[in-house]
């Protein structure tokens, strides 16, 4: 450890944290920015000791507490935008980009006007007064909106859903059907005399067209990545290798502690674009040499266990689904998937579509959307990445209201 390190390059552990933590790439110390100190100590004292990495959720202690000039803004750099996915009541760009600023300011104003309430005592909190809190929040949003007009802190650089669809030649299917409210107050779709979910409705639609249908989403692809890439990623000759320790995911699932913590070696830039830049040759050679995936899958499954646990790609149901996906894809398509994930694992691991549909002639990824549902940023990222790097056929299947 170097006491004189000036922390020239800092990596944010998780952009979605309220009090963000940063790790120095050189001395590896973890710290927070002084500009968050007042708010953190007053309202979130229990969030100042540990941080966890986005993606792996690996927990790391904050070793240096608050330090000056840590966040990009205090360092005079452009703050990185971390927009939240559109949610109920928070679909505007202001609410999605400035969620942290809005939350901080709303909390502060609430407790400033209620000195009798201790934010760190159990019992009453700002959320005990939803109506009053909502009014304060509305006021804060209005003010940030005005401020954004004059000097925007974040640049909105997202493509709209329709821009993404047209740029990626994604097929768009709209089927209008009768919607019904079910007992669990979920949306149901009438299909002949049955009430089914939106996903099930889409699945039946493709089966009637002669396709076989698998529900996939992202995790089976994480399994494939873990099984086929652990040898390269965990290469013992990698100078950037370091020990990581994390809680067993099997223990997490069972609620017991049979396995205890897992220690394994990973490069400290794993999952970033910079990792791929550094190891491109090795990664591409490894992928190009893959052969007989059926045999390799079984052979490497056990050996890749630690790495797959790290990726949360450990569950038996996901493993068997991954094997099915591998068979449907075939070797050449599998290689495309592995390459796409290797390029930027934490950037590309989310947003995989709901369904993989296939027949003898075609493989197609299908994202299912109900009537008010829009593509998330992760899903847009997948469609753009697929178009640029994998080239699978893609469909957005939207169930509208008749
Ligand atoms: Zn440092
Ligand atoms: Zn700062």
Image (tube, rainbow, N blue to C red):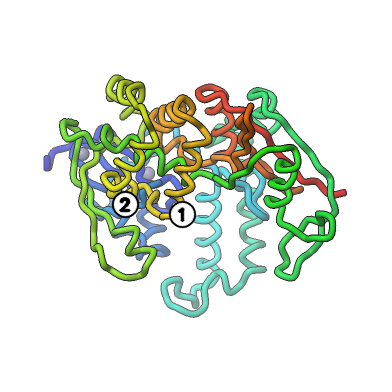
Q: Residue furthest right?
A: 402
Question: Which residue is rendered at x = 41% and y = 55% of the image?
Answer: 315
Position of 369 with respect to 224 (left or right) is right
Q: Is residue 176 above or below residue 257?
A: above
Give the residue number, with chain letter if any, for mark 1.
317
Q: Are marks 2 and 1 in contact (CB under 8 Å)?
A: no
**Camera-side mark, 2 or 1:** 1
Crowding around mark 2 (Cα neighbors within 10 Å: few <14, some 14 to 19, many 20+) is some
Q: How far is mark 2 from mark 1, CA to CA?
A: 23 Å
Q: Can residue 77 be spotted in the picture? A: no
Give the residue number, with chain letter if any, for mark 2.
58
- Give how far across and how far down residue 141 sits, in percent: 63, 50
Q: Is residue 52 above or below residue 232?
A: below
Question: Which residue is rendered at x = 65% and y = 23% of the image?
Answer: 167
Q: Earlier in the sequence, mark 2 or mark 1?
A: 2
Position of the N terminus, as image quadrant, is: top left
The answer to which quarter of the image holds residue 393 is top right
Position of 283 with respect to 121 (left or right) is left
Question: Which residue is rendered at x = 36% and y = 27% of the image?
Answer: 291
Question: Which residue is rendered at x = 46% and y = 26% of the image?
Answer: 336
- Give how far across and how far down residue 364 sits, in percent: 62, 33
């Amino acid at each position: 450890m170097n006491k004189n390190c000036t922390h020239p390059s800092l990596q944010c552990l998780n952009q979605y944290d309220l009090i963000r933590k940063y790790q120095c790439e050189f001395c590896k110390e973890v710290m927070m920015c002084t500009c968050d100190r007042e708010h953190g100590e007053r309202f979130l004292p229990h969030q100042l000791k540990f941080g966890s990495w986005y993606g792996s959720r690996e927990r790391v202690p904050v070793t240096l507490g608050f330090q000056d000039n840590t966040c990009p803004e205090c360092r005079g750099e452009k703050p990185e935008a971390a927009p939240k996915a559109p949610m109920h009541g928070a679909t505007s760009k202001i609410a999605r980009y400035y969620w942290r600023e809005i939350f901080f300011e709303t909390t502060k104003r609430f407790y400033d006007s209620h000195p009798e309430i201790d934010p760190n005592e159990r019992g009453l909190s700002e959320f005990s007064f939803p109506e009053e809190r909502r009014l304060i929040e509305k006021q804060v949003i209005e003010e940030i909106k005005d401020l954004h007009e004059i000097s925007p802190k974040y640049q909105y650089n997202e493509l709209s859903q329709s821009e993404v669809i047209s740029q990626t030649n994604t097929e768009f299917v709209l089927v209008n059907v009768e919607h019904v409210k079910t007992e669990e107050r979920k949306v149901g779709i009438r299909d002949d005399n049955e009430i089914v979910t939106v996903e099930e409705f889409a699945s039946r639609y493709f089966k009637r067209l002669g396709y076989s249908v698998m529900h996939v989403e992202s995790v089976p692809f994480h399994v494939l990545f873990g099984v086929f890439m652990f040898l390269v990623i965990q290469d013992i000759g990698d100078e950037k290798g370091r020990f990581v320790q994390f809680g067993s995911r099997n223990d997490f699932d069972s609620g017991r502690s049979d396995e205890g913590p897992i220690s394994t070696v990973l490069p400290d830039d794993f999952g970033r674009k910079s990792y791929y830049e550094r190891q491109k040759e090795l990664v591409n050679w490894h992928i190009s040499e893959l052969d007989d995936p059926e045999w390799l899958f079984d052979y490497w499954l056990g050996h890749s266990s630690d790495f797959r646990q790290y990726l949360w790609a450990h569950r038996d149901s996901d493993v068997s689904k991954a094997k099915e996906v591998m068979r449907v894809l075939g070797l050449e398509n599998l290689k495309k998937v592995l390459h796409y994930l290797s390029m930027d694992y934490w950037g590309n691991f989310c947003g995989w579509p709901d369904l993989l549909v296939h027949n003898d002639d075609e493989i197609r990824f299908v994202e299912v959307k109900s009537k008010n549902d829009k593509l998330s940023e992760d899903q847009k990222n997948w469609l753009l990445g697929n178009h640029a790097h994998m080239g699978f056929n893609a469909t957005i299947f939207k169930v509208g209201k008749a």
